Amino acid sequence: MTPETPATPGIPGDTVIVAEHLRRVFPRRGRPDVVAVDDLSFTVRRGEVLGLLGPNGAGKSTTIKMLTGILVPTAGRLEVAGVDPTRHRTALARRMGVLFGQRTTLWWDLPLGDSLDLLGRVHRVPPDRLRRTRELLVDVLDLGPLLGTPVRQLSLGQRVRGDLAAALLHGPDLLYLDEPTIGLDITSKRRLRELLTTLIAESGVTLLLTTHDLSDVEALCRRVLVIDHGTAIFDGDLAALHVAGGSARTLVVDLVAPVPSLEAPGATTVRTEDDGRRHWLRLPQDASTAPVIAAIAAAHEIADLSVREPEIEDVVARLYSGGGPAVSD
Ligand SMILES: Nc1ncnc2c1ncn2[C@@H]1O[C@H](COP(=O)(O)OP(=O)(O)OP(=O)(O)O)[C@@H](O)[C@H]1O
């Protein structure tokens, strides 16, 4: 494997991934080709945690597969740790961990422990280091009681934990997690997120995560890349995502005496119910509710009120559909 970092002018030296005008087409016999990834460009710096979001079929898994070298791009340029992943797949595999939540990389018929040992040998991890890392992962992922169980007998949550151990066994500094929490119960999800949070903080790993669970993104990612129809429609941090999605806070006001419409400076009434007793007012996400509440209270007797923060789900859904501002109701 050649250079560690890309020598592309204008790209910071700690950049680990460079994707430029990436395209991947799947030809189909007798039917139109599928353009899974289309003119996708982005960079990732060392230690960054990037959430890859997009609706079903947007091209997220195809992108991850190109990054790992499993799939060859039809066009465009891809550089991972300074090399072309399809030409240096084996060398990159030593520093890369991959988890596909929907399928296992473990041997189906082998006990989990044997699978892990075998993988350690495949990656040529020195025995001492393998033993230490294996012990640590077994402890943190609570795999002890499962080591003797054939992978096919593990529950989904147990299997994903086993797969995560497999992905981390050789100490990768680049981690691709494709839907790691899919199908997990709330407790397993929380544990996995906590583990990843610790890993990110302690090891400085670069992590690319695809998920449909936006609470994964809120828990783990600072930056998100939203893909739709194979191309990037947003690249930035979570705060910018709210701005791009037209996020709004919603003030729900219950009045003692009904009014047909409620006016307040800085807010727009978006809904009225209960014969004019309950009103929904929308404010920009960064606006203070205090002056709006004060203005309403000066003119009306308030029975109750609540503020609803925008849901990231609504914001992202708006982006997918290219729609207007997100309003929580
Ligand atoms: N091997 C293949 N042959 C033909 N078409 C494919 C192949 N792999 C993926 N596709 C198509 O490419 C498009 C992108 O698929 P991809 O799996 O990358 O999407 P995704 O964003 O990961 O979706 P999801 O959220 O549903 O997992 C889809 O239309 C899919 O049907």
Image (cartoon, rainbow, N blue to C red):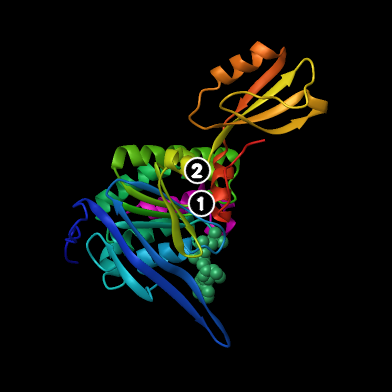
> Does label 1 or label 2 sit earlier along the sequence?
1
Asked if residue 168 lies in the magenta stretch, the reply is yes
* 142 sits left or right of 262 in the view: left
Return the mark for residue 282. Answer: none
* 3 sits left or right of 263 in the view: left
Residue 202, image quadrant: top left
Q: In the rendered image of this protein, does residue 264 appear above or below residue 22?
A: above
Q: Position of residue 243 (x, y in %)?
A: 47, 40
Q: Amino acid at mark 2?
A: Asp
Residue 229 seen in the figure? yes
* Residue at image point 16% right, 62% down: 3
Q: Amino acid at mark 1?
A: Thr
Return the mark for residue 216. Answer: 2
The residue to which callout 1 is attached is 211
| Element on which disc 1 rests | loop
Residue 153, image quadrant: bottom right
Asked if residue 99 lies in the magenta stretch, the reply is no
* Residue at image point 36% right, 64% down: 67
The crowding category of the residue bearing disc 2, from other C-alpha atoms within 10 Å (few below 14, some 14 to 19, many at least 20), is: many
Q: Mark 1 and mark 2: span between their CA atoms?
A: 7 Å
* Residue at image point 36% right, 41% down: 199
Q: Report the magenta residues as a range.
A: 144-170
* Residue at image point 75% right, 31% down: 272
Q: Are the residues at dot 1 and dot 2 in contact (C-beta closer than 8 Å)?
A: yes
Q: Position of residue 80 (x, y in %)?
A: 28, 61
* 40 sits left or right of 318 in the view: left
